[in-house]
Amino acid sequence: MPEPSARTQLLRATLGNVPGLGDLSSDAVDSIVLAAEEGETEDGQLVYGGTEIVTHLYVVRAGRVRLERAGSAAERTRWAGSGETFGWHTLTGIRGERATSDGATTLLRIPERALLQALASAPLRREQLRASVGGRAGAIGARAKTSSEAQASRIFRAMVDRAFQWFRSPAPYRRLLGYALFFGGWYLTVEAWALPHFDRLPGITEVVHEWLSKDPTFGLSVYTPEYYAHIGSSLRRVGIAFSLATALGVPVGLALGSSTTFREYVFPVFELLRPVPIPAWIPLAILVFSGAEAPIVFLTFLASFFATALNTFLGVRSIDPKYVLAARCLGASPWQVFRHIVVPGALPFVLTGLQISVGVAWFSIAAAEMCSGQLGLGYVINTSYTEVKFPTIVIGMLTLGILGFATSALVRLVGERLVVWRARELSMERP
């Protein structure tokens, strides 16, 4: 019989010292050993944060990990060294811990599913193990009733700290200065100086007064229900079109970058249609799609789709071929190469494409609604021009800008979270 590896010996010895796991059968321990994944972390790398659900039990094979938890100063920090375990959230369900590597660290992580399957055949069941673990995590259990309040307080304090840091930086004041220069230039050129060609435009004072008026002269302000009906209609159309463009554009872009055969068939047609402006598609969209909604959603989807697919394709093409060759030399299947190299490698470009895509969707919706539909901000701008309601035109334009800014920021925020999550997962995956 071959000698067990150092990894196997470490796991067996560690699990044997944990109350409840020491009673497991040898077959159950072997199943946990086989399911354990090994990974390396760098100095200061986050293993998991305080708000996420931890789905693995960790064993330190080499190095040590700093564990921080909200509480008194004596309870806030502890260390897990070689042969020690952490990450008992899988069984206790208690959150609020932050695990960070202290130097280069080698970790073994046991999936929650494998751990619970092994416990199913053990004399000491999951609930009993929770109690036995309480000896080491007694302070955690004592604060279990108030963990949600403590977590909310910690998150609030972190948000306040970030807000104070942001206000102490020059960024907010530069942004305010940029807005001041823009609106100040608008006021000076149109109202104060009445420069030629600019004197025919609505001034900022007139627009703001109309926008905030309870009895608007031209019938549209923040106090009129019609204003929110137009916003809701445009938001719904952009949401549908952007979702469809993401669902189709990302797979098409991945396929264009990964498959030479698919690219040779599809990419010439893709490049032939991509430069065609959206207004040129309007007659065909009206002919093909019945009703007023479908043509608008199709036109918005089309522009968003091309932006998403192209950026995804460029992301795949930017991956160094050496990574793919190395994976194939190590025996990786095409699906493994696609999942572990192509998708994460293209992810930053995909997220950039989505930010561009949602912006493209907003100016496409404006063009589409000018030619079709009874509601929407583009419809407002077009009808206001024909009815000589110039302040309402600017109100529609500024509303489009605010909505586009907000949705782009939301996509960017979600993208940043996804990139951080994926980077942490990749660092812990088995090579």
Image (tube, rainbow, N blue to C red):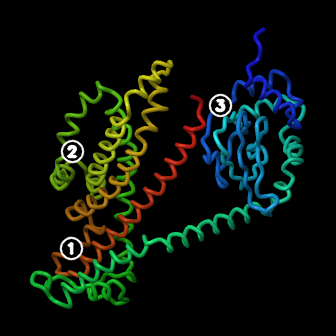
Left or right: where does residue 52 sit relative to residue 174?
right
Q: Quadrant of the C terminus?
A: top right
For marks 1 and 3, give the CA distance.
Answer: 63 Å
Looking at the picture, which amino acid does disc 1 mark? Thr
For marks 3 and 2, give the CA distance.
Answer: 45 Å
Which residue position is annotated with label 2? Answer: 274
Q: Quadrant of residue 26?
A: top right
Which residue position is annotated with label 1? Answer: 383
Give residue 245's mark: none
Instruction: Kindly state the secondary structure of the residue where label 3 is placed.
Output: strand
Residue in front for this viewpoint, 155 or 390:
155
Give residue 38's mark: 3
Residue in front for this viewpoint, 73 or 188:
73
Mark 1 vs mark 3: in front: 3
Left or right: where does residue 149 sit relative to residue 412?
right
For marks 2 and 1, give the CA distance.
Answer: 29 Å
- Around disc 2, counting alpha carbons within 10 Å, would you say few (fewer than 14), some (14 to 19), or many (20 or more)? some
Instruction: Kindly state the secondary structure of the residue where label 2 is placed.
Output: loop
Instruction: Kindly state the secondary structure of the residue where label 1 is placed.
Output: helix
Where residue 138 appears, as percent x and y from the top left, is 87, 52
Q: Quadrant of the N terminus?
A: top right
Name of the residue lying farthest toward the top: 1
Looking at the picture, which amino acid does disc 2 mark? Arg
Name of the residue lying farthest toward the front: 103
Q: Is residue 309 above or below residue 369?
A: above
Sequence order check: which comes first, mark 1 or mark 3? 3
Looking at the picture, which amino acid does disc 3 mark? Glu
Mark 3 vs mark 2: in front: 3
